[in-house]
Amino acid sequence: MLSYRTARLALAGSVLALGSLAWAGLLSYWWLLLPLALYLGAVAYGSSVISSSFFIETDCGVATAAPEIALTFDDGPIEPTRHILAVLRKHEAPAAFFCIGRRVMENPAILRQIDAEGHIVGNHTYSHHALLDFFSRKKLLAELEETGQAVQQAIGKKPRWFRPPYGVTTPNLAFAIRALGLACIGWNVRSMDTVAQDEQKLLHRLLAALKPGAVFLLHDSSAATASILDTFIQEAKNRGFKIVSPSHLLCQPAYD
């Protein structure tokens, strides 16, 4: 699997080889742009495709024949999270909630409800800032540490799971994740529910993506998800799928 380290080694080796040939007059120095372009393309792909594990190993699902799926929700806790919890409670369906630290501080009671009802709480940075990918190592460490502390203060558990906002990873973020001993958790079914305009289209997209070992990325901030979640879970059950804890599906402990 291509990684950041192997991409850098390949770039260095290619530049050295092509540079030597160019110095010997066997080809133009313009050829040095080719490995650079390929390297930049690999970095762009690795940053945006979380399943590539380009910068850091990321658990996005499992290969299994068992008809089991897992639900995950990002960006809470907020008041609409209570509706999501009510639907999950109705179906006795466990889930994981990747929470934003500042919202944990604003809504500790909702976080305690998430935990009390048997769901996993994960780290989703403190600010979920739009420019997070450009933060320094020090600032990213603070983002992750503050969220972990906020969660631990609210429920008495230190989250081990971390999910990158927007699914974007960078060398600095990978450093912060490793430094804090966190596990990077992704998904293999992206619902796109934050931009969904048609609830029925969202429902059909989710049902079409049902497969053993699926980890669904949803958002408790999405009105469309809140509207179709009950129907989706019931139809998944009707098709023989069991909704299990993400920790069970991924075989990963969620807390330190």
Image (tube, rainbow, N blue to C red):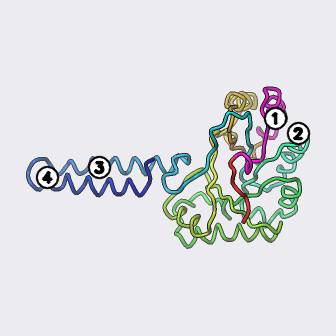
Region in magenta: 225-249
User: Relative to 92, does residue 32 appear above or below in the rendering?
Assistant: below
Label 3 near label 1: C-beta < 8 Å?
no
Q: Which residue is mark 3?
A: 35
- In the image, residue 214 lies in the stretch drawn in magenta: no
Q: Which residue is mark 4?
A: 22
Q: CA distance from mark 2 to mark 3?
A: 52 Å
- At mark 2, the secondary structure is helix
Question: Main SS type for the magenta part?
Answer: helix
Report the disc number at residue 174. none
- Please identify, in this view, whether the residue under mark 2 or under mark 3 is nearer the observer: 2
Q: Earlier in the sequence, mark 1 or mark 4?
A: 4
Residue 189 horizontal side relative to residue 22, left or right: right
- Three-letter amino acid code of the residue under disc 3: Pro
Q: Residues within 10 Å of mark 4 (few under 14, many from 20)?
A: some
User: Relative to 233, does residue 80 appear above or below in the rendering?
Assistant: below
Q: Which residue is mark 1?
A: 233
Q: Residues within 10 Å of mark 3 (few under 14, many from 20)?
A: some
Q: CA distance from mark 1 to mark 3?
A: 47 Å
- Three-letter amino acid code of the residue under disc 2: His
